[in-house]
């Protein structure tokens, strides 16, 4: 496991991508005291794409997202924007984001972020292996003419 | 001042505040009371409730004078997402009367599009039902409201259908003065 601590940008993405079950298993602790800045609300966002990742941007379609913002008693603010309509996940992600900006960061990096990252990496590798197993090498037989 | 929550239940409370503001606008000089909102100083709870209800990313907002502070800008950015602009581009403006400056600086609408005029939220007023005599649409006979500068407001009303509209806020209280109201003497 790489010991490089994740930046905020990375952990926001990592937590948002993690399935709720895994997030709940890794961080079952009672949530700390907090106040809502924005209660979880479900909405839609337009996702843009680029053909071949280089063409002009076009609207690919809308995706359902849930956002939430919390404030800890110390004043730290955590935001979350997760795909889907799971308000509990948005709450958890926002709390994690807030706590990761406090003195709990080191502990949470080790107990939550590292396992999440490992699981995500493993999933990606499994998928890559499965895809690799179906790879076909095309070749052209030389026709025996002449 | 730290960032605070806006409406606890945005859909319900925004609808309620909208109804109350509509009531105030359609009955000029009527003093109404809005729900209490945690607003960053120096913004009054009533002004904050109006902003949360009427202002969003498509309505340019002008913050005048002391209201143009870091806490207020953060609050606007988080809760409203409204672009902050100068008076000449504003759809809404917020400030105390003296800070808002000359009314001619705001969009007055045109004869074809009178709706393209600004709404000024005048904060920190002393709202009393006495002072200038008001008549016009929404007022059965006559109404009285303490107004900050009768002469300037008369000039504004004389431009009807052009001109700006006013919401006067004080604590959790609000009164409206649309441009259609005729203003008599004090």
Image (cartoon, coloured by chain):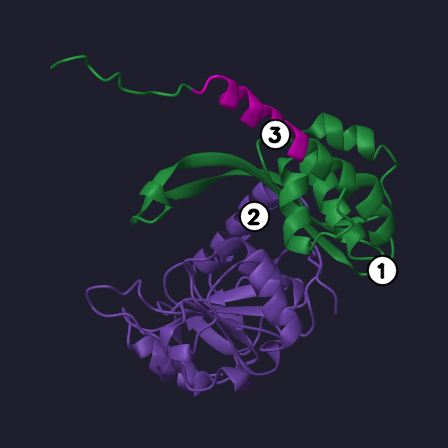
Q: How many marks?
A: 3
Q: Which residues are magenta?
A: A121-135
x and y percentages locating residue B123 in the rendered image: 59, 73
Chain whose colour in the figure is purple: B
Return the chain for callout 2.
B
Q: Marks 1 and 2: which is nearer the front?
A: 1
- Where residue B57 sits, quadrant-wise, is bottom left
Chain whose colour in the figure is green: A
Query: Are labels 1 and 2 on one chain?
Result: no
Precedes in sequence: disc 3 or disc 1: 1
x and y percentages locating residue A67 in the rendered image: 61, 43
Q: For mark 1, what is the residue? A: A74
> Mark 1–mark 2 contact, CB under 8 Å?
no
Asked whether B35 or B81 is in front, the reply is B81
Q: Is residue B75 above or below residue A14?
A: below
Asked whether A16 or B70 is in front, the reply is A16
Asked whether B143 or B123 is in front, the reply is B123
Q: For mark 2, what is the residue? A: B14
Q: For mark 3, what is the residue? A: A125
Return the chain for callout 3.
A
Residue A123 on the magenta span: yes
């Amino acid at each position: 496991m790489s010991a490089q601590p994740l930046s905020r940008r990375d952990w926001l993405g990592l937590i948002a991508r993690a399935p709720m079950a895994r997030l709940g298993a890794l961080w079952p602790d009672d949530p700390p005291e907090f106040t809502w800045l924005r209660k979880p609300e479900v909405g839609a966002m337009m996702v843009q794409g680029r053909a071949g990742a280089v063409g002009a941007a076009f609207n690919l379609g809308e995706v359902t997202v849930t956002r939430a913002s919390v404030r800890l008693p110390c004043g730290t603010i955590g935001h979350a924007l997760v795909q889907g309509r799971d308000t509990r996940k948005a709450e958890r992600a926002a709390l994690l984001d807030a706590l990761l900006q406090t003195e709990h960061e080191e502990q949470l990096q080790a107990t939550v972020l590292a396992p999440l990252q490992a699981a995500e990496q493993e999933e990606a590798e499994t998928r890559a292996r499965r895809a690799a197993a179906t790879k076909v090498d095309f070749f052209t037989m030389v026709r025996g003419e002449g | 001042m730290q960032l605070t929550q806006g409406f606890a239940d945005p859909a319900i409370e925004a609808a309620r505040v909208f109804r109350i503001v509509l009531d105030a606008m359609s009955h000029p000089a009527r003093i109404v009371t809005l729900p209490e909102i945690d607003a960053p100083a120096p913004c009054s709870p009533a002004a904050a409730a109006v902003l949360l209800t009427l202002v969003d990313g498509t309505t340019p907002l002008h913050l005048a004078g002391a209201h143009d502070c870091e806490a207020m800008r953060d609050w606007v950015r988080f809760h409203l997402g409204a672009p902050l602009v100068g008076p000449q581009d504003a759809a809404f403006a917020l400030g105390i009367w003296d800070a808002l400056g000359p009314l001619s600086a705001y969009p007055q609408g045109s004869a074809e599009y009178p709706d393209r005029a600004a709404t000024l939220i005048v904060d920190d007023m002393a709202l009393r039902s006495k002072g200038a005599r008001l008549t016009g649409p929404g007022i059965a006979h006559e109404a009285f409201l303490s107004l900050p500068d009768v002469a300037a407001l008369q000039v504004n009303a004389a431009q009807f259908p052009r001109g700006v509209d006013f919401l006067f806020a004080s604590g959790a209280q609000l009164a409206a003065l649309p441009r259609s109201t005729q203003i008599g003497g004090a």
